[in-house]
Amino acid sequence: MKKIAVSVLALALLGGAAFAGGSRSGSRQTSRALPPGFSASGLPIVSQPFTINVMQVRYRSHGADFMNNGFYAQLAKDTNITVNWETRYTADFNEQKGLMFASGDLPEVIFGSTGFSVEDIVNNRELFIPLEDLIDKYMPNLKAIMAQDPSVRKAVTYPDGHIYSLPSKLPGRPQILDGIFINRVWLEKLGLAVPKTTDELYQVLKAFKTRDPNGNGKADEIPWYIIQNSPSNFQWGSTGLFGATDEWIVENGKVIYAPASEQFRQGLEWFAKLYTEGLIVSEYFTMPSDVYYATGADTSIQRFGFIMGWTADGDIQGNAKDFMAIEPPAAPSGKRYVKPLNEGIRPIEMMITAKCPHPEVIARWADQFYTPDAAVQNTFGAFGETTRKEADGSYTVLPLSATPGFDGLDFRKWNRSPADCGPGYAPANLKMNMDTSSGDGLKLDLDKHYVPYLDMSRVMPANAWATVEQNAEKASLKVALDNYVVAATAEWISAGRVGSWDGYLAELKRLNVDRYTAIQQAIYSANK
C-alpha cells in the first residue's frame, strides 16, 4: 500500500532511458566468470560460503522475522549461500525507486513484486538481466514447471521476447480480492439490520457515528475505516460498491476508462457525502498505511464499524472478533459488484539486475523455491514452526496457539514468511489444510459470500501484455490523467459533492483519454 508522488513516477518512467544512453535492445547479459566452487547441479551450489545481496520491499507493520525462520536457515545450509537482506518499506519506497531507476543504482536481486510493476521493468529493461538462458541452464525445477504449464512461460515472456522476472503461483488463493465486514456487535446493540443496499449502508454508518455504539460517551467511532492508499485506486474505486473497481471496465468487449463512467460519478457522489458527514476516517487523504494498521490494532476500545479488505483481522487484528462478513450492498442500479483478485500467474516475483556479478548463482538459488515444499514454506512459514507437511502429502497451516503473540494468522504469515512475495509455484493439486477462523483459511471461506457476484467478463485479463511501444505511449499519457483524476476527485470528496462533470470529461478528453483508451482496447483485444 503506497502513496505515489506523480512527479517521482514520471522520473521512474524516464530514468531508465537516461541511464541507458538511449539503448533499448534488451540484449542478453554478457558472460562472466563463474565463482570458484560453483556447481551447475546438485547441492551445495557453491563449495565455499557465499553471500548474495537481496532487497525486499515490505509493509513496515509486518516486520522481517522471516529472515530468521527455519526454512531460510535450512536453505542457507543446503546451498552454502547466505542472504544479506536489504529491507525497504512501502511508505516511502516510490521516491526511492524513482531515484534508483534514474541513477541505475539497484541492488543485485529484487525479491517480490511489492513496490515494483511490470511497467517499471519494461521502461528500464537495460537494468535487468534477461533470464531465459539462465532458466534453461540452471533452473531445472522452473524449466519443468514451464513445460508442464505453458501459461507460466507465457506470463513472464515480455513483448520483446525476453524474460526479465521470475514468476510465482501461490498456494491457497481465493477468487475475490476484498471482503466486506461490518461490526455485528454494534448492529445488535443499535437494533439495526445488515445493510442490503448502499443507501442502507449510509444509514447504518450514520447511526454508528451518532448513537455511541461503543458506549463510552464519546464521539470517537470511525464508521468506515478506510484510507486512500494509492491514486491507482481512484479514491473509492477499490471498494467495488458501484462497479468501478479498477482503472478499466469491460462491457461487451468494449474497454471503458472507469473514471469517465457514469457509475464512477454516482459512486463518487455517494462517497463524498460520507466523507463530509464524518462517516469515513478524517485522515482519509493523509494517513500512512503503517499508522492505519497501528490504529486498527488498538484494542483498548472498539472504534470501527465497517471495513473492506483481505480479511477483517488483516486490517484491524484483534478488533475483528466483533465483525461479520456481509454480501456486497447493491448499488442504485440494483447490481452487486465485487473486486476479483484476477491474479493468474504473478509475473514479477524476482529480478536479477545488471549489478549482479554472478547471476548463475542467483538462478540456482532461486530454483530451490520451485518445489511444493518451498512454495508452502515461503508463503506460510517453515515446517515445524508455522506449517507441517502431512504423511498424505498435504500441508497444514498450524493454529495461532502454536506461535503465541499474534492476533491473527494473516499478520503471523506476513511476519514469519515473505508471504505473497518471492518466486515459487504451487501445483493445482496441492492440498492445504487451514483454519477457517482467521488468515488465508478464512479468506478462502469468505469467497462463498462473493463469488456469486463475480463477473470476469468486465475485467481486463490478468497479465495482459502491451507492446513496448504501447507501454511507452500509455505511460506518457497516464501520468497527466492520473494526476488530474486524483486532484479532481479529492476536491469533490472534500467538498461533499461532484462539481461540473461535463467540464471534467472535457478535460479528460483534452488530456487524450480517447487515445489512452484506444491503446488499452488494443491490448485487451490482443490478450482476451
Image (cartoon, rainbow, N blue to C red):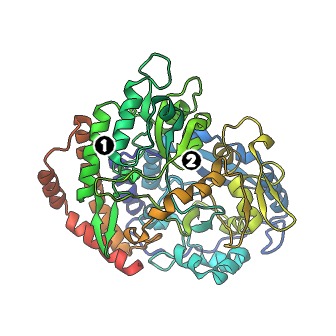
Numbered disc 1: secondary structure: helix
Judge whether 66 appears above or below 522 on screen. above
Q: Is residue 35 visible?
A: no
Disc on the earlier residue, 2 or 1 = 1
> Residue 35, relative to residue 435: is it above or below?
below
From this viewpoint, which residue is outermost toward the top?
A: 217
In the picture provided, is 130 more to the left or to the right than 394?
left
In the image, 7 versus 18, the foreground residue is: 7
SS class, disc 2: loop
Neighbour tally class for label 1: few under 14, some 14-19, many 20 plus, Cα within 10 Å: many
Say which residue appears at 59% left-offset and 27% top-offset: 299
**Rendered-image quadrant of the C terminus:** bottom left
Q: Nearer the viewer, residue 471 or 434?
A: 434
Q: What residue is drawn where x is 28% and y is 66%?
A: 256
Kindly indicate the quadrant of the structure image that contains residue 223: top left
Q: Which residue is disc 1 drawn over?
A: 271
Q: Quadrant of residue 423?
A: bottom right
- Indicate left or right for 297 with 305 as reference: right
Query: Farthest residue in the front direction?
Result: 191
The residue wearing badge 2 is: 311
Q: Where residue 382 appears, x then y in whole percent?
A: 78, 53
Left or right of 391 in this view: 379: left
**Residue 52 at x, y percent in the picture:** 70, 56
Q: Nearer the viewer, residue 223 or 422?
A: 223
Q: Amino acid at mark 1?
A: Phe
